[in-house]
Amino acid sequence: MDLGLLDALTIALLAYLAVGLIFGMLFLGVFAARIDPAAKGASAGFRAIILPGAIALWPVLLRAVLSKREPRERSAHEEATR
């Protein structure tokens, strides 16, 4: 591999993680309760556990935050009646 390509990939990965860290902090502070009302008032331990996932999956979580739909819980019983 060319060193320039490795540098570009490293920069892209670091940028992705930096945006993820910023979004993850915002997500834990503001947006988590919007997606799941049970997350409102969550403990620091819970927030520490979900932060790495929020950093890694920030594009998916951003899409969920930006969607206009209210979150709706689905159950196996409800799905079976359809």
Image (cartoon, rainbow, N blue to C red):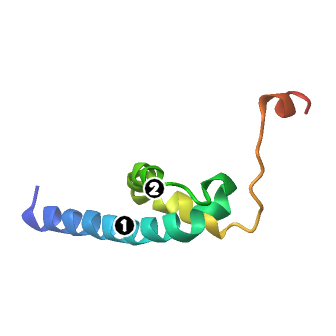
Earlier sequence position, callout 1 versus callout 2: 1
Mark 2 burial class by Cα count in 10 Å: few <14, some 14-19, many 20+: some
Can you give x and y, in whole percent of width and height, for residue 24 in the image? Answer: 44, 64
Q: On the rendered structure, is 69 left or right of 81?
A: left
CA separation in Å, label 1 and label 2: 13 Å
45 or 21, which lies in front? 45
Percent coordinates x, y for residue 17 in the rendering: 32, 64
Up the image or down, 81 lies above or below 39; here it is above
> Which kind of residue does numbered mark 2 sit on?
Arg
Residue 55 x %, y %:
40, 59
Q: What amino acid is at disc 1?
A: Leu
Question: On residue 47, which mark appears?
Answer: 2
Residue under the image location 22 percent in, 63 percent down:
9
Q: Which mark is residue 77?
A: none
Residue annotated with mark 1 = 21
Out of 16 and 77, give the one closest to the viewer: 77
Residue 58, percent from left and from top: 47, 61
The local secondary structure at tag 2 comes to helix
Name the residue rendered at 9%, 61% in the picture: 2
> Tag 1's secondary structure?
helix
- Residue sitting at 45 percent across and 57 percent down? 54
The residue sitting at 83% across, 33% down in the picture is 79
| Front one among 37 and 9 | 37
The image quadrant where one finds the N terminus is: bottom left
Q: Nearer the viewer, mark 1 or mark 2?
A: 2
Q: Residue furthest left?
A: 3
Q: Is residue 53 left or right of residue 62?
A: left
Residues at badges 1 and 2 in contact (C-beta under 8 Å)?
Answer: no
42 left or right, relative to 71: left
Identity of the residue furthest to the right in this view = 81
Position of the C terminus, as image quadrant, is top right
